[in-house]
Image (spheres, rainbow, N blue to C red):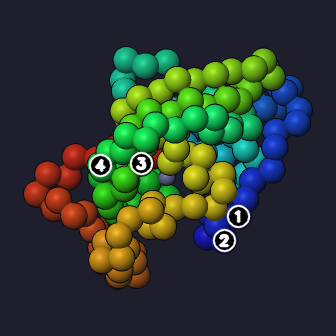
Amino acid sequence: DPVLRSKASDVREFDTELAREVERMVAIMHGAMGVGLAATQLGVLRRLLVIQAGAEATPTAVANPEIEWLSDELAVAEEGCLSLPGIGVDVERPLHARIRGRDVRGEPLVVEASGLEARVLQHEIDHLDGVLILDRTDRDQRKQALRALREGTAYSPSAEDDEHSDT
Ligand code: ZN
């Protein structure tokens, strides 16, 4: 899908249409048991994401997210993606992140995140820039994941424990 490779543009109108879009995204994220979703995954080229890193967490929408700071400390974990069904690959990312953006009403928002939440935020912001986990993994895993996508099969580097969160 070429939209997944496109760069989204800023949200400008913080109106009821945006609030409805956020509601729709949260519902789709929940329905897919995901922990995050970017508007571009639904074919909407706007800089908008929703995240809910964990069942206890409150779903949060971030419009026009900017990465303000990333830790030097990195971590590798397997990531899945709702746009790449059946695929999981190892991705190395900073463990901590500070993201600045706007909430659904247009008010400034800062999210200080660590661990899974920081990972999901970076994954969704990547989506807004047309970047997929396939671009963030090593060559061997990318090759095997692309083959699985072509053949309509599943791929995961840790095939036995299929424990990853789709985002
Ligand atoms: Zn994704």
Residue under label 2 = 2
Disc 3/disc 2 C-alpha distance (Å): 25 Å
Q: Residue furthest left?
A: 160
Where disc 2 sits, the SS reads helix
Q: Is residue 22 visible?
A: no
Residue under label 4 = 77
Residue under label 1 = 6
Q: Identify which amino acid the numbered label 4 is placed on.
A: Ala
Q: Judge left or right: residue 139 versus residue 50.
A: left
Residue 135 position in % (x across, y down) = 48, 67
Point out the frontmost of discs 4 and 2.
4
The residue at 17%/59% (across/down) is: 158
Q: Residues within 10 Å of mark 1 (few under 14, many from 20)?
A: some
Q: Is residue 61 visible?
A: yes
Point out the frontmost of discs 2 and 1.
1
**Labelled pair 4, 3 in contact (Cβ < 8 Å):** yes
The circle on residue 69 is none
Looking at marks 4 and 3 on the same chain, the residue that comes earlier in the sequence is marked by: 4
**Labelled pair 4, 1 in contact (Cβ < 8 Å):** no
Q: Is residue 91 above or below residue 142?
A: above
Disc 1/disc 3 C-alpha distance (Å): 22 Å
Q: Residue furthest front?
A: 72
Disc 4/disc 1 C-alpha distance (Å): 25 Å
Q: Is residue 4 above or below residue 35?
A: below
Looking at marks 3 and 2 on the same chain, the residue that comes earlier in the sequence is marked by: 2
Residue 111 position in % (x across, y down) = 57, 24
Q: Identify which amino acid the numbered label 3 is placed on.
A: Arg
